[in-house]
Image: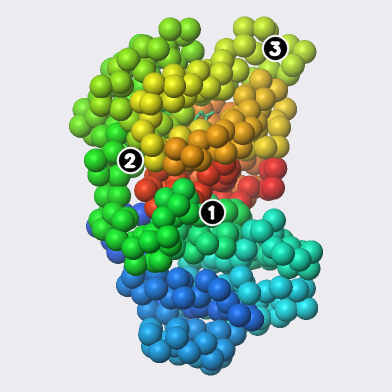
Amino acid sequence: MKDSYLNFVNSPFGASLARSLGLPKPEVLRRYRPERPEFDGLVAIGAAREPQLLDALADLVASIGVTSVAHESVGQWVPLANRHELMTGRFEAADPGSSAKLAALLFDASGIEDSTQLEPLHAFFHDTLRSLGKCGRIVVLGRPPESCSTPRQWTVQRALEGLTRSLGKEARRGITANLLYVTPGAESGIEATLRFFLSPRSAYVSGQVVRIEASVDTASSSAATDLASLQAALPLDWKRPLAGKRAVVTGAARGIGAAIASVLAADGAHVIGIDIPSARDALETTMRQLNGTALTFDIAAPEAPAQIAAALAEEGVDIVVHNAGITKDKTIAKMTDAAWQSVIDINLSAQERIDDALLAAGILREGGRIIGVSSISGIAGNLGQTNYATSKAGVIGRVQSMAPHLRARGITINAVAPGFIETQMTAKIPLTIREAGRRMNSMSQGGQPVDVAQTIAWLAHPGSAGVSGQVVRVCGQSLIGA
Ligand SMILES: NC(=O)c1ccc[n+]([C@@H]2O[C@H](COP(=O)([O-])OP(=O)(O)OC[C@H]3O[C@@H](n4cnc5c(N)ncnc54)[C@H](O)[C@@H]3O)[C@@H](O)[C@H]2O)c1
């Protein structure tokens, strides 16, 4: 759906009118385009105390080909300065008179062990935030509080959430701010995630906290714990990381599902799209364009899991995306049994049954990926959506409960929770509620289906093996449920 307000305030006349009336001016978000460089510009790196991730960070920043400058908080950490010719010293472009703009701010807070050691974060963001360009990126890295050895360390690492989320709200201008908690031993597994959060692919993902654990591969093989061997095992072609993979996407005929299919195909996967028989034409058209395969099933039918498993058995699958979903909104006193049951069945129980069938027969291969589409309604609840919110909260429970069971097979399971995304589903919402949903987030606009799709592609990436059991909101840092 078109956001007429966003288009208007970004026209020359609309921009000056918005300025004179003091109206909000949502930024036109920079999204990934294969023909444009994915990473560009200058990245400022800061750190505190004895940073443990700086080495991996500097390697990654160098490998994506951007220039980096080190803030004085990095101090005299010699290996970094020598290897990457980073400059130290107060960041000069923070001078308000300077036109230089930064593309991203990275801060390694992994060495902070006590709340008295937080000052370098203030100094770094104080000096650099005004120099961060439109649609810039902020990524703070720390240690998962629950992995910390002392209560003080746990406390201060947990404090990073408040900082990062506030930065997302203060920065505006299409800037995102996210926090990555890297478990000790998982340092070599951060590249795919860091790339995602630095890239235009994460245009509508802000205020999120992601934990990266040592994946089964990296944990079990001592050879793979060093960065060089892990990188050697990762796809060299970062533009087509899913080459050779087979991905199933339910509800792929339109909306977010069609966008997921399209992004996974662009990343190299063979996509098998599933949708209901009445959506056959749209599904076949989408799949033909992507050289994919169209399968028509009502996923909630009792025989569907076995039929889907049979259709996929010969070649197996690597990625399963449970996107199909419906709404049947009514307050609970007015909600019929059928409306309750169909929403729970399609949005939640069908996912469980299909996964069971694919896992029991080993059709979802080792190292596979399961991604469920939840919703911020499942986090916050919503008036008139008891059925929908129940089903979507269940999707979250499912990934959290299944992740430990699937770990031994190297299979990850995660959920994305979209906020307001411009689709036919949200076009049905009454105008005033729709406008509120669109604007009540740090981006002051709704997301696009491609924003959800790109987040799913990151979770499906071979390099995301250390990300499991998590829920990532694609909501522009919505105020709802935050
Ligand atoms: N649009 C949003 O703002 C938003 C926000 C949060 C979550 N979501 C979730 O994202 C997912 C996609 O939403 P959308 O906006 O693209 O919806 P949509 O209605 O445009 O598309 C849903 C697709 O699922 C298919 N489908 C429905 N029931 C099915 C069944 N029984 N078997 C097979 N396919 C079935 C439909 O035919 C359709 O193609 C849903 O799970 C939805 O709950 C959407």
Give residue 413's position: percent from left, percent from top. Answer: 50, 38
As measured in the structure, the alpha-carbon distance from the residue carrying label 3 to the one carrying label 1 is 42 Å
Residue drawn at x 77%, y 73% as measured from the top left: 115
In the image, 147 versus 168, the foreground residue is 147
**In the displayed structure, does residue 452 sit left or right of residue 179?**
left
The answer to whether mark 1 is within 8 Å of ligand 1 is no
Depth-wise, is mark 1 or mark 2 nearer the camera? 1
**Which residue is at a point 57% across and 59% down the rendered structure image?**
183
The vertical placement of 139 against 470, above or below, is below
Closer to the chain start, of discs 2 and 3, is 2
What type is the residue that disc 2 sits on?
Leu
Residue at horizontal 79 percent and vertical 64 percent from the top: 151
Disc 1 packing (10 Å; few <14; some 14–19; many ≥20): many
- Quick check: marks 1 and 2 in contact, CB under 8 Å? no
Residue 133 at x, y percent in the picture: 48, 71
Q: Please state if 395 lies on the left or on the right of 137 as rendered.
A: right
Q: Amino acid at mark 3?
A: Met
Residue drawn at x 36%, y 54% as measured from the top left: 32
Tag 3 near tag 1, CB within 8 Å: no
Q: Which residue is mark 2?
A: 264
The residue identified by callout 1 is 213
Q: CA distance from mark 1 to mark 2?
A: 24 Å
Q: Quadrant of residue 314?
A: top left
| In the image: residue 119, left or right of residue 50 | right
User: What is the distance, in whole Å, between disc 2 and disc 3 at their CAs?
Assistant: 37 Å
Residue identifier under label 3? 335
Quarter of the image where one finds residue 289 = top left
Q: Secondary structure at mark 2?
A: helix
Depth check: 326 or 424 in front?
A: 326
Classify mark 1: helix, strand or loop.
loop
Q: Looking at the figure, which quarter contains the N terminus?
A: top left
